[in-house]
Image (tube, rainbow, N blue to C red):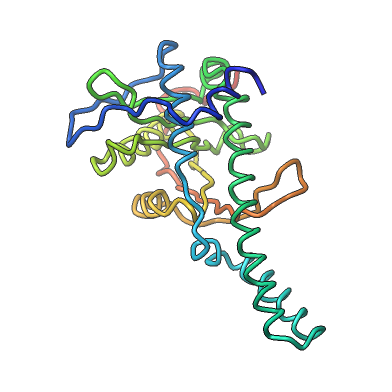
Amino acid sequence: MSQETETLVKEEGVSPMKKSSMAPYSIRKYQNRDDKWVRELFFKSMGGITFPLNRGLKSPRILMLLSGGLFILFLVSGSWHLTLLAGLTILITFRFFNKHVWNYFINFTLNTDLSDISKYYFSEQGSCLWVAESEGQVVGMVGALPVNEPALRREHLQLHHLCVDVGYRGQGIGKALVKTVLQFGQDEDYRAVVLNTTIFQPEALALYQGLGFQKTGGFIFTINGRVGLISVTQFTYHLPFRQASKSPRQDD
């Protein structure tokens, strides 16, 4: 981890952005001068996510693993007290590791695509990052990149890092940012926009589903393929087909 990123992640006193009630905003492409604001916004938005146990237990995979393990323990021990104690211990540990895995994701992102936004989001056609600006401040962001799978890079665009400052939520900024990505995907002749999100982001889940995204899969987020606790849901929005008025998009 770079010294700059380590300082940012450990610092709890990042000055909050100015809060506003229905302040006007505009959406534009990222500029180099936005770098600090974008990184701080991502850190604050992602770091502010909580992991209540009742949401974690809504994951069918986690619930099945927990129930199965406790049932086996009861069969072996024959003790309800031991089983309940073990269940409580597992839930507390589950919450702790959820936070650990999430912090890893934040650090990983700050050290990869958000460490050099121009390189990752503006070095090839068919990718971009936008910010929402209000009263001279960056209060929202979203990125879009072709998916990693080589066979689908020309067809599927992946939405990344939708964030809105807490003081500016409820004004439709998040919806406007997502619609910006959808319009971009259509203009660039993609067939679909895909994204990943978690049950710990209920507002994002409601937003995506309200805009017409459909669940198409899921997986368990892992750290280097070893520890996996956070259930991730994949969503897809199929873009309307249009007769291209230009030659097919070519990768640089």
Task: Write down the quadrant of residue 146 in the picture.
Answer: top right
Describe residue 107's horizontal placement relative to residue 214 as left or right. Answer: right
Q: Residue at x 72, y 81 (%)?
A: 71
Describe residue 71's horizontal placement relative to residue 169 as left or right. Answer: right
Q: Is residue 88 above or below residue 189?
A: below
Q: Quadrant of the C terminus?
A: top right
Q: Residue at x 50, y 35 (%)?
A: 160
Query: In front: 107, or 248?
Result: 107
Q: Quadrant of the N terminus?
A: top right
Describe residue 173's horizontal placement relative to residue 162 as left or right. Answer: left
Describe residue 232's horizontal placement relative to residue 17 as left or right. Answer: right
Q: Residue furthest bottom?
A: 78
From the top left corner, tell me how far across and down residue 86 is, in percent: 69, 72
Q: Residue at x 73, y 73 (%)?
A: 69
Counting every numbered tag in the picture gives: 0
Q: Is residue 178 above or below residue 32?
A: below
From the top left corner, tell me how far across and down residue 229 is, in percent: 65, 54
Query: In front: 144, or 227?
Result: 227
From the top left corner, tell me how far across and down residue 137 is, in percent: 30, 21
Q: Residue furthest top?
A: 33
Task: Write down the quadrant of residue 31 in the picture.
Answer: top left
